Image (cartoon, rainbow, N blue to C red):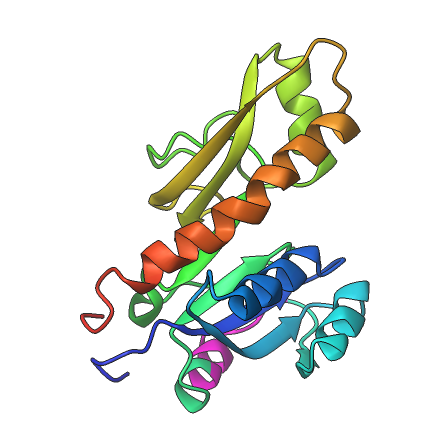
């Protein structure tokens, strides 16, 4: 891999609605995210493919888990700086050339201590996370943007945003509040990631 990597060239990996992709597209158009989406990968047929198409982006469906070789070939051939996981439900391998170049957003507050905490780890995604937060009696939740490593939700934290867990919250009501935070958190964190070690990896 080249030692001069343009981290503003993004590949977005998705598996669901594509809401996060649309938000990133909008932020780029508004000029608040200095990046270019040059690649979109879906793990399955999903509404996000149609939303990507509407934004003028082509999508490749790669079922199952992407291999290290295929990931590295893709990144090299498309000169991708950062891989952005946007509701992607498959585990992505993180070989050394991709260290601190794969970014994820998690709908809870991860501790950033390498453990994933109580609300991260295998199987902890979507409404399962919000339900677990409420059942644990937490008074605060939020979202965490972090670099990926080879475990779930344990990589270095880039940015967190918090919100109050209100009395009477349901997983659905908490999810709406957390997603509202994600809309700002992900672009902010990506901008930070793009300006950190831009040419040193």
Q: Residue at x 76, y 76 (%)?
A: 54
Whole-percent x and y of residue 183? Answer: 58, 48
Whole-percent x and y of residue 73? Answer: 45, 86
Q: Outermost residue, bottom direction?
A: 77
Whole-percent x and y of residue 163? Answer: 55, 24
Left or right of 20? Residue 7 is left
Whole-percent x and y of residue 27? Answer: 55, 61
Reply above or below: 81 against 84.
Answer: below
Reply above or below: 90 against 63.
Answer: above
Q: Nearer the viewer, residue 86 or 24?
A: 24
Was residue 71 drawn as part of the magenta stretch in this picture? yes
Q: Residue at x 76, y 11 (%)?
A: 168
Was residue 190 drawn as part of the magenta stretch in this picture? no
Q: Please identify the quadrant where the C terminus is shown.
A: bottom left
Residue 161, visible in the rendered structure: yes
Residue 124, visible in the rendered structure: no
Reply above or below: 163 against 199.
Answer: above
Left or right of 170? Residue 143 is left
Q: Please identify the quadrant where the N terminus is shown.
A: bottom left
Q: Residue at x 61, y 64 (%)?
A: 26
Task: Give residue 48's quadrant in the image.
Answer: bottom right
Numbered range of the magenta stretch: 65-74
Q: Main secondary structure of the magenta part?
A: helix
Task: Give residue 191's quadrant in the image.
Answer: bottom left
């Amino acid at each position: 891999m080249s030692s001069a990597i343009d981290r503003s060239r993004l590949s977005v990996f998705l598996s669901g609605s594509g809401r996060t992709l649309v938000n990133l597209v909008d932020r780029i158009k508004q000029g608040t995210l200095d990046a270019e989406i040059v690649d979109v990968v879906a793990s399955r047929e999903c509404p996000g493919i149609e939303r990507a198409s509407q934004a003028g982006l082509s999508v490749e469906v790669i079922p199952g888990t992407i291999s290290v070789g295929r990931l590295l070939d893709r990144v090299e051939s498309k000169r991708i700086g950062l891989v952005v996981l946007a509701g992607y439900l498959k585990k992505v391998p993180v070989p050394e050339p991709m260290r601190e170049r794969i970014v994820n957003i998690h709908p809870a507050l991860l501790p950033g201590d390498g453990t994933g905490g109580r609300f991260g780890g295998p199987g902890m995604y979507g409404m399962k996370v919000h339900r677990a937060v409420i059942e644990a009696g937490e008074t605060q939740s939020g979202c965490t943007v972090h670099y990926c490593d080879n475990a779930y939700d344990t990589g270095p934290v880039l940015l967190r945003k918090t919100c109050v867990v209100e009395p009477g919250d349901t997983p659905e009501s908490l999810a709406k509040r957390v997603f509202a935070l994600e809309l700002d958190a992900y672009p902010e964190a990506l901008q930070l990631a793009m300006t950190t070690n831009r040419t040193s990896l």
